[in-house]
Amino acid sequence: MIFGLDPLYDDFSAWGTTLILVVAKVLIVFALLMVAVMFMIWFERKQIAMMQNRMGPTVAGPKGLLQTLADGVKLFFKEDLVPENADRKVFKLAPYLALVPAFLTFTIIPLGGNFRDKAGNVKIAGHFTSLQVADPPIGLLFFLAMSGVAVYGVMLAGWASGSKYPLLGAVRASAQMVSYEAALGLAVAAVFLKSGSLSTHDIVAGQWGSGGWSIRDWNVLATGFVPFVIFLIAGTAELNRPPFDLVEAEQELVGGFHTEYSSIRFAMFFLAEFMNVITMSAIMVTLFFGGPSGFLFGPSWLKVILPTFWFMAKLFCFLFAFVWFRGTLPRLRYDQLMDLGWKVLIPLALFWFVMLGAMEVAADNGWNRVAIVPIAIGVLLAGSALLLGANRSARTARERDEVAV
Amino acid sequence: MTATNLNETADRVRRRDASPVLRMSETAAANLDGNPADPADDERMIMNMGPAHPSTHGVLRLILELQGETVLRCKPVVGYLHTGMEKTGEQLSFLQGPTNVTRMDYSSPLFNELVFSMAVETLLEIEVPERATWIRMMMCELNRMSSHLLFMATNGMDLGAVGMMIYGWREREEILRFFEKVTGLRMNHNYIRPGGVAADLPDNWQADLTELLDVLPERLDEYDILMSGQPIWRDRLQGVGVLNTAEALALGATGPILRSTGHQWDLRRDEPYLAYDQVDFDVIVGTYGDSYDRYAIRLNEIRESLRIVRQCIETMPKGDYRIQDKKVTPPPRARIDQSMEALIHHFKIFTEGFKVPEGEIYVAVESPRGELGCYLVSDGGAHPYRMHIRGPSFVNLQTVPYLLQGGVIADGVAAVSSVDPIMGEVDR
């Protein structure tokens, strides 16, 4: 059970094939992620260039496709620089702390499989297995834990650089990522409440209705859209992507936490950032958009491939959205970011979670479900009025203090 | 708590913290009252922003005293781009002068040329032909647009709207393309010279310009969608870097910074030069004196400039584009082959230069950044005895410690951006 819920582990008699399958899965996902990151960087640069009337990369490879490879090779051969004031060990450790969680999170994403039978397994070499590297029963907690570890990568990088701009970046990073993790967790809890399982595999299976595939079964609608919006915003903040890229904030902190990094260590941060974009998009697809669920047709071999195709298509929409955010939105200020997190997202997520819980209880106890929603909204309005009042009185008190100075 | 009360509090804090420090040495500032007895308790941090920093517009250096991210005090340091251009101006003849001054405020070069030429003309007591005046006015208004578009670009970039950077430059490039057609160069034109302009407008200039004027309003409306109405954009700029009229006047701030405080002051309207009294335009003023007002003023000044340029196209008078004074204007190339006198004039103007009567003069124009002045002293020779430029960027930079006071670093970036300093003009 500790390896996960994959039926592959049910039978250890043919352990040789099992081992080969597991290694193959790991290698494929690793390669897939690396290639995806490479093309994601290319895609982002090309897309943002199109939005800004530019050409983007054009020289390396057809349409500049190999630009990332060229950049990577260049960064490999650059001088490895550690600032004199840096805490050398931590400075060298930090990029790994950023990169490794980015890899690990991706292992819990179901990349394909027909979930019509709720199993979602495919048969390879006589073994049934699900199309994901690992399916731990604590999948979502694992995801939250990994994003928690990733904070250390950014924070320690800034702290260990021994320089002021990265230090400010590190302070911003720890505050921002920790506070948005709360909103992120509450949005995830709403999904958990609906699916009743923390395993990503089960969550995807739960979004595949008994009659086959339907958009109405997707958690984005089943949880009432709000958790998805909260997750999208909090996830963007968690990724330090624009408009929440205060940790890097080129125009304010020069490069933020990675100002002092160069060579391959910088490349690792860069890789980790884009890998996280892909992973976060994949998580969103898994949690809210049914993962690989989609319209299936054609011969049986097509039905094996199509779920993966749908997964990729949905993933791509989110990748595009992240680039779109970057192309459009100005950056928030630090205090505005905190306000949004603590005063809007977390209360809203909490309220929504409680409301979904009340509806579940209502369903179990046979209460009138129609009454729940108006009552809940009434509570929301009263709560937000209280919160606004509290904010206002706090601000007035602060102003009075300032006058008294 | 009303806004006025808050402002008064902020003023007091500002007066207490900002003003003495700026006249103090670093050591003296370290011994100020309120410093904790034990240095280990001091959570304040001195940070250097610049001279090489992405959003200090070139080589401005800000010494920030920070508590967390809050800016307690700020001290701008200038001089990293000092090349002694005013001194160089004393070595160049009056005809060569514009080549020098045009490099000061490199984003609005025509204004520098204009103010220098106007100073020389006043000393010479000559009056340029009407067509030259209108060409100057039209070109300057186009230059105001290109300069403000550059501001739109950098302001967007400083706030993280990186797309805006490209859009601003794209539109600016359209205007620079027209400049290239008229003057031969995109920047540093040396187009406006004492006695008129260097060349007449090219054939079909109206068509080129009309095309430009048709495109720009749409693009400006797009800026409104992308930025003005954007909640994040408004949050980042509104109430950030606030200055009131009294402070702005005391600090000598001019241009959009002064107008943003609600003070109506525009040299084009209040002390008309060129033909500004014959065109119809509005002076844009703000209300709150914050960064958003300064942004909005510049955006709308582009629209006003468009209006002026339209009127220039309609009323562009016929006639000479430079004064027909043989002592000031070099003869046309063809005349040199025919006339001995023309050859002598040509030779004298380009070797010795023309002599300007003894005297001193101060002339000011409204550049995109504020009052651009030229103080010129002539000892009767062919070179200025002293040439001083009152660069609005330099004077406006004095407001920076006040604008940054009490904000966070991100506000500081927004405020410096909204001052729109051009370091070439600051350091001269």
Image (cartoon, coloured by chain):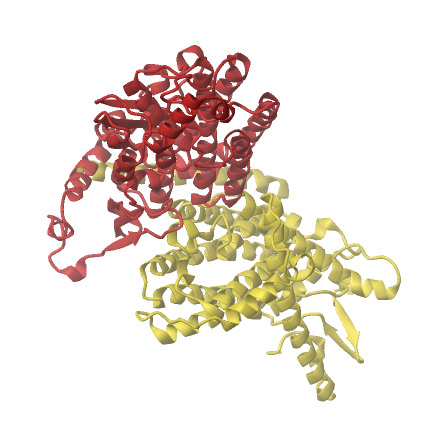
Chain colours: A yellow, B red
Q: Residue A254 sits in which quadrant?
A: bottom left
Up-down: is B230 above or below B308?
Answer: below
Query: Do we see residue B308 in this rendering?
Result: yes
Q: Residue furthest top?
A: B278
The residue sitting at 38% across, 73% down in the picture is: A90
In the foreground, B334 or B247 = B334
Image vertical order of residue B1 relative to residue A130, above or below: above
Residue positioned 46% across, 21% down in the render:
B339
Q: Please tell me in which quadrant of the rendered image residue A108 appears.
A: bottom right
| Residue at horizontal 47 percent and vertical 39 percent from the top | B153
Disc count in the image? 0
Compare residues A98 and A62 and report the one nearer the observer: A62
Task: List x then y, in percent, for residue A191.
Answer: 60, 56
Vertical placement of residue A65 versus B238, above or below:
below
Whole-percent x and y of residue B214? 60, 24
The x, y position of residue A360, in whole percent, is 60, 52
Name the quadrant containing residue B269: top left
Q: Is residue A186 visible?
A: no
Q: Residue furthest right?
A: A299
- Viewed as shown, does residue A82 lie left or right of A282? left
Residue B169 relative to residue A306: left or right: left
Position in image of residue B131 (x %, y %): 47, 15
Residue nearer the viewer, B96 or B85: B96
Q: Is residue A167 left or right of residue A33?
A: left
Q: Is residue A362 above or below residue B395?
A: below
Q: Quadrant of the N terminus of chain B?
A: top left
Quadrant housing the C terminus of chain B? top left
